[in-house]
Image: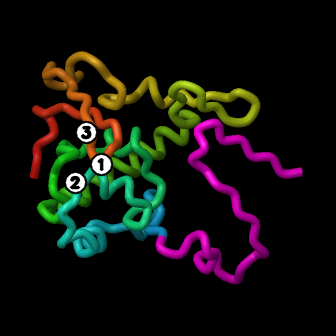
């Protein structure tokens, strides 16, 4: 028996015969490298996005660029990288992309270790909840930035709720 429960309706499940190469699965065509893939590198991301005028927050959520970054984690990654979610992607340097990759690896690894981020109704297994939400620095936060005491701003980027610190996160 196979069971799947997704209360937020974001996920999908596909069943395939085992392929020779998992990258050949139709559902994975056009999906970028996994956020934790050791082969993910700043030079490749810089080249892939050098002409994109979209805000970096939207690009981080684009699964064809990097797979596995969701809205909460995009806010946290950009905060740790000190990059404004409004920064135009083509304005980012190789060093900016490396900061994003490093923050992504730290944050996602910590979140996995903590069992994920449980906000509102999400749980996994038999009502197991993650605890990474206790480590969030900006996403969903009201009040002042923990680093500089500037009020955290809640806005929208690409129709997604976004939290950031306008002092700590510089627009590029």
Return the disc, 3 or 2, that comes first in the chain's sequence.
Answer: 2
Q: Which residues are magenta?
A: 1-30
| Residue visible at 22% across and 54% down in the picture | 55
**Residue 57 position (above or below residue 127):** below
For this view, does 40 lie left or right of residue 45? right
Where does residue 157 sit, x and y in percent of width and height?
A: 27, 44
Q: Would residue 76 be seen by someone viewing this image from the given angle?
A: no
- Depth-wise, is mark 1 or mark 2 nearer the camera? 1
Secondary structure of the magenta portion, mostly?
loop
**Residue 24 position (above or below residue 66):** below
Are the two marked residues, 3 and 2, in contact with CB atoms closer than 8 angstroms? no
> Which residue occupies the foreground of this view, 20 or 54?
54
- Identify the image quadrant of residue 153: top left
| Residue visible at 75% across and 71% down in the picture | 16
Q: Is residue 6 magenta?
A: yes
Where does residue 79 sit, x and y in percent of width and height?
A: 25, 39
Q: Residues within 10 Å of mark 1 (few under 14, many from 20)?
A: few
Where does residue 56 sit, x and y in percent of width and height?
A: 24, 54
Secondary structure of the residue carrying numbered label 2: loop
Q: Which residue is mark 3?
A: 79
| Residue visible at 21% across and 67% down in the picture | 52
Are the two marked residues, 1 and 2, in contact with CB atoms closer than 8 angstroms? yes
Q: Which residue is mark 2?
A: 55
Q: Which mark is residue 83?
A: none
Return the disc, 1 or 3, that comes first in the chain's sequence.
Answer: 3
């Amino acid at each position: 028996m196979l069971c799947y429960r997704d209360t937020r309706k974001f996920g999908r499940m596909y069943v395939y015969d085992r392929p020779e190469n998992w990258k050949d699965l139709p559902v994975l065509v056009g999906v970028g490298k996994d956020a934790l893939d050791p082969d993910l590198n700043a030079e490749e991301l810089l080249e892939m996005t050098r002409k994109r005028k979209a805000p970096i927050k939207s690009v981080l959520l684009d699964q064809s660029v990097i797979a596995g970054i969701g809205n909460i984690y995009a806010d946290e990654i950009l905060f740790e990288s000190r990059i404004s979610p409004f920064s135009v992607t083509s304005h980012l340097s190789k060093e900016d992309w490396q900061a994003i990759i490093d923050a992504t690896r730290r944050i996602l690894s910590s979140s996995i270790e903590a069992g994920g981020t449980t906000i509102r109704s999400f749980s996994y297994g038999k009502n197991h909840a993650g605890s990474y939400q206790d480590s969030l620095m900006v996403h969903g936060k009201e009040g002042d930035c923990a680093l500089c005491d500037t009020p955290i701003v809640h806005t929208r980027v690409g129709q997604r709720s976004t939290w950031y610190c306008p002092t700590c996160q510089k627009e590029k």
